[in-house]
Image: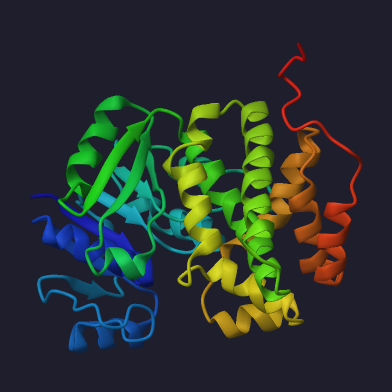
Amino acid sequence: MAKIGILGAGSWGTALAVLLDNNGHRVQVWSTFEEEVRMLNETHEHSEKLPGVKIPQTISFTNDLEESTRDKDVIVLAVPSPFTRQTAHRIGKYLKQGQRIVNVAKGVEEATLMTLSEIIEEEIPQADVSVLSGPSHAEEVGRKMPTTCVVSSRTQKTAEYLQSIFMSPVFRVYTTPDMLGVELGAALKNVIALAAGVADGLGYGDNTKAALITRGVAEICRLGVRMGAKMETFYGLSGMGDLIVTCASVHSRNRRAGYLIGQGRTMKEAMDEVKMVVEGVYSAKAAKGLAEKYQIEMPIVTEVCKALFEDKPAADAVNDLMLRDKKVESPALPWE
């Protein structure tokens, strides 16, 4: 049995708490909101973010950041990506050398273009940082629906340890050494999911969504490989797998926000209606910044940014994607 602290009592943090408790671990969850902690300790259900999922009484919730992090075998960082740096900065003073931290948020920091693991390592240099990602909506994990994810660490030993912590009959975990690829796939697919939602909101069909998913993978691969990630990662769980589920699922907040924008809402109106952090909005500018830094063509990301931040009509953005210059699908393939 491991002692595990989970930082963030949103839908994903709560679902992982239930999973880890069911695996026999001692779980404590931190939230910055006193009312949320009181509600969760009293009702044992997150009625707003994870309705219908009963939380075992063996899971405790607290506002005390030191209590939830000190002397833990594993800390799961489940705060939304825009709050990763400040949370990591706050907890560093409580953590021992070699403290295992698993980040489960998805994003790239706009100001620095750093991945979330890089941010955590900068703020907590003594930590042993890993990431967990994949096609895993909290609503389904909380209800024990079969799910697969991938964990990536700096060492095989840490990855295999975490694999054993999270693995269950309904939650299968793979390992990979390509942490950069896992994080880029996780963050950038949210931007593509916004585009897929826009297409749905405009009333387009399956052909359009399939095109966005396929060409979205091409954009992510081009950037990721240029940055040093491995191509195989983007065709795995944290790449293609997560992209499919995020573009297609009714649970996807990124797809939902895109859908509302496609129907004519502004970015702020869409985010207000979704009522949860839409991480693709925060990652879109960072993705465009990475594309410019590494001189990679990412037309879908570019048009998403124009629709989000320059008030470009969504229909015009799709039209401009369709009317781009003629291209070869796979330039590396030679003609006979």
* Residue at left offset 69%, top offset 40%: 219
Looking at the picture, does residue 275 appear above or below residue 148? below
Position in image of residue 62 (x %, y %): 26, 74
Position in image of residue 19 (x %, y %): 20, 60
Position in image of residue 254 (x %, y %): 58, 66
Taking the view exactly as shown, the residue that stands out farthest to the front is: 336
Position in image of residue 147 (x %, y %): 30, 54
The one nearer the camera, 28 or 252, is 252
Looking at the picture, does residue 196 appear above or below residue 9? above
Q: Quadrant of the C terminus?
A: top right
The one nearer the camera, 279 or 139, is 139
Count of labels in the image: 0
* Residue at left offset 53%, top offset 82%: 275
Task: Residue 113: name its quadrant.
Answer: top right
Taking the view exactly as shown, the residue that stands out farthest to the top is: 336
Q: How is the image coloured?
A: rainbow
Looking at the picture, does residue 75 appear above or below residue 181? below
